[in-house]
Amino acid sequence: MNNFMNLFAVFVMFIQIQIALSQAIQAPPGSNLVQQLCKRNRYQALCISTLNLDPRSKTSNLQGLASISLDATTKKFNVTLTYLISVLKNVTRREEFETYGTCIEEYGAAVDRFLPAVVADLKAKKYSEAMSEMKDVVAKPGYCEDQFAGQSPLTARNKAVHDIADMTADIIKTL
């Protein structure tokens, strides 16, 4: 009987070790995934702060983190588009009207057409299509910036929007 108890104790200890090892290897989604993902991103600090701001990141897998990043990008585009529309209301010169109007068209295309297409492509796991659409999204702030011929009052805004979109593109590339 004593040998049986010793054998049983060894068996229980073996099971406990196996459970502990499997839990160490399979960290919960999102726990260290944000750090690993953002380490490979060109915008590492922006990536970490953007993803960690969203509570969903703690339990998300890679696809979930891409969706969180895409949500943040969409929000940034919407905020900038709203700002551009408010500025346009106060423009009096024709050249400024055309310049801001072009920016509104570019940002509007991203918000209305390209970003929803990326969302749909991610849900359908069509990652190459999502990347193709994201390339267009990333380019939109640059097209707006080009309208000002080097004297843009929107440089900081356009850069912030570009960077978060490019960060999101980097995340989608990993899928």
Image: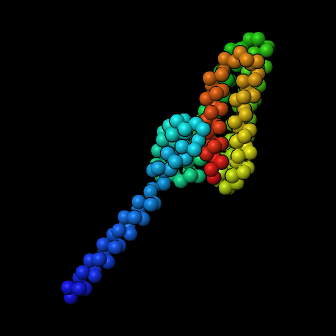
On screen, residue 73 above or below 125: above
**Which residue is painted at 55% across and 38% down in the image?**
44
x, y percentage for residue 35? 49, 45
Q: Which of the pair 100/137 is nearer the observer?
A: 137
In the visual, does 109 lie left or right of 165?
Answer: right
Q: Which of the pair 1/161 is nearer the observer?
A: 1
- The image quarter containing residue 46 is top right
In the visual, does 41 lie left or right of 23?
Answer: right
**Which residue is painted at 61% across and 45% down in the image?**
171
On screen, residue 32 above or below 74: below
Seen from this angle, which residue lies furthest bottom?
1
Q: Which of the pair 14/60 is nearer the observer?
A: 14
Seen from this angle, which residue lies furthest left?
2
Answer whether residue 11 is visible to the viewer in this image.
Answer: yes
Answer whether residue 101 is visible to the viewer in this image.
Answer: no
Seen from this angle, which residue lies furthest top?
93
Number of numbered discs present?
0
In the visual, does 169 lie left or right of 30?
Answer: right
x, y percentage for residue 162? 65, 32
x, y percentage for residue 98? 79, 19
**Which residue is painted at 35% across and 68% down in the image?**
17
- The image quarter containing residue 41 is top right
- The image quarter containing residue 28 is bottom left
x, y percentage for residue 165? 64, 37
In the visual, does 141 lie left or right of 19?
Answer: right
On screen, residue 20 above or below 82: below
Q: Which of the pair 78/155 is nearer the observer?
A: 155
